[in-house]
Image (tube, rainbow, N blue to C red):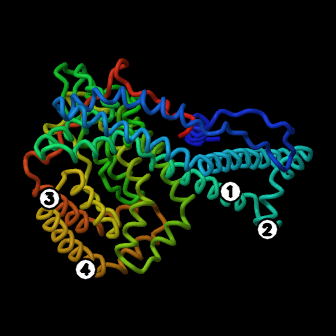
Amino acid sequence: MNRHFVIVSCVLLATAATVTAQSTPPTATQPARRVHRPYDEEAQRRRGQAQTRRWEGYFVDMYKLNDQQKQQLQTTLAEMVEADVKYWKDVDAVRNQASDEYQDYARKLDYSRRLKLARTKNEEANIQKYEEFLKDERQAAGADIADDALVDIMTKKQQDARKRFDAIRNDAPLTMDRIAEAVEKTLPPDQAKAGHEEFLKRKPYGGRPPSATQPAVGTRPATPGARVQPLPDDPRLRRPSAYRTVTVVAPSLDRWAAIVEALIVQLKLDPDQAQKARRIHDQVKGWADQYVQSHAKDFQDASAIADADERGKRLDELNRPLDVRYDELISRITHLARADQYPAGGPSAPSFAPSLDRWAAAVERIIKERRYDEQQTTSAMGVLTDIRSRAQQQYDAHKDDFARAEKIADPAARGQELAKLNEPLDKLFDEMLQRVKGMSRADQIPATQPAAPTTATQPSRRIELAPGR
């Protein structure tokens, strides 16, 4: 069982309702279902009130609220708590069902791994036992289905259950983002804007002010030889999307190694650092390869969508986990550098273009991150249309060359040929990004990311969700 799988299982176990044993023991073909406590409205209300009491002071400070605005905030929070209580009551049954289904497939996938091991060791008793556990799934899929194909089917069903569970959790009314949105609607524009900027800085820390004891990401420490960032096991580097919004659009996986090599040269990493950088690449790309393989059918279906806008949206949704991993890759390698290796202005990964279907996503993320107004948005989308059209013409003119390059057997030779063919597209993509970012006003340019929190301000790794969540 891989580490990611264990973490996901633990999250669901932690957020599920308290479990008691069933009166009848589990059988080989019917694992025991957990018994969930009845939904407790009053307990959920108390949890919501306790949470909003912690958040209230943070929002007053972030948005500089006066006495009248504080009273409005208290009223808003009370209403959101009641909406939260009702929401979790309405979704309690389906949440429990999704959680149970996820755990059932976690158990069955564990059985399938044990079955595979038993087959390699010719352990007939264990083979029979685990086959019995999986009998229902095998019958539903077809008695002659191969073990690996059955694992793929069960993995997909487990992922579907997780998506339903996450969708329920993400739609909850009582979150910091929804509170911020509600507060900003009641404030003058200038006050709302200043408060929102402070909110974005504090959001990674649960509303608390970020620590000022460490250098901000992207700055050079004053002490020669010091690290630009805490060691790479900092959770901000392992899980970037949990601490900031990831806006990068990742290029294709076969180009990640070239980007790593370019960063090694740009940062002037020594042999030991370069070796660590390549190990980080192998680790992160290994996960990315597994993700693409497990979602191959989803990518194939998305690529076949006729409508260009719908195709782009679906591909963007599927690629978001890869964007997060690519951002992690760049962050971890960048922060291997010492201060004396850090280039002026900070390092930057080469602007390798993603597939043309994702260029719109790159522009839309800049628009969202920088809070462009209607005129800026219109101009940005015009730049997208113009440059993407030129890129499409470039690609169409060399479509046969790309097809021949993809068939080159030697990976190094294939990579070199594809890099040569992609160079004009990379330049066009970089031009598009620079022109769209160049439309920003000074107050729209994102501030440097805050430093990783110290022990005193580090957000808890445990997801603080009540049994109703």
Give the class, few, some or many, for how many residues have Cα within 10 Å of label 4's Cα (few <14, many ≥20).
few
Looking at this view, name the residue that lies furthest to the right: 125
Whether label 1 touches label 4, CB < 8 Å: no
What secondary structure is marked by label 1? helix
Comes first in the chain, label 1 or label 3: 1
Relative image position of residue 411 (x, y in whole percent): 45, 60
Q: What amino acid is found at the position of numbered circle 3 in the picture?
A: Asp
Residue underneath mark 3 = 373
| Figure quadrant of residue 62 | top left
Residue underneath mark 1 = 154
Residue underneath mark 2 = 142
Q: What amino acid is found at the position of numbered circle 4 in the picture?
A: Gln
Comes first in the chain, label 2 or label 3: 2
CA distance for labels 2 and 3: 55 Å
Relative image position of residue 344 (x, y in whole percent): 13, 37
Relative image position of residue 242 (x, y in whole percent): 39, 39
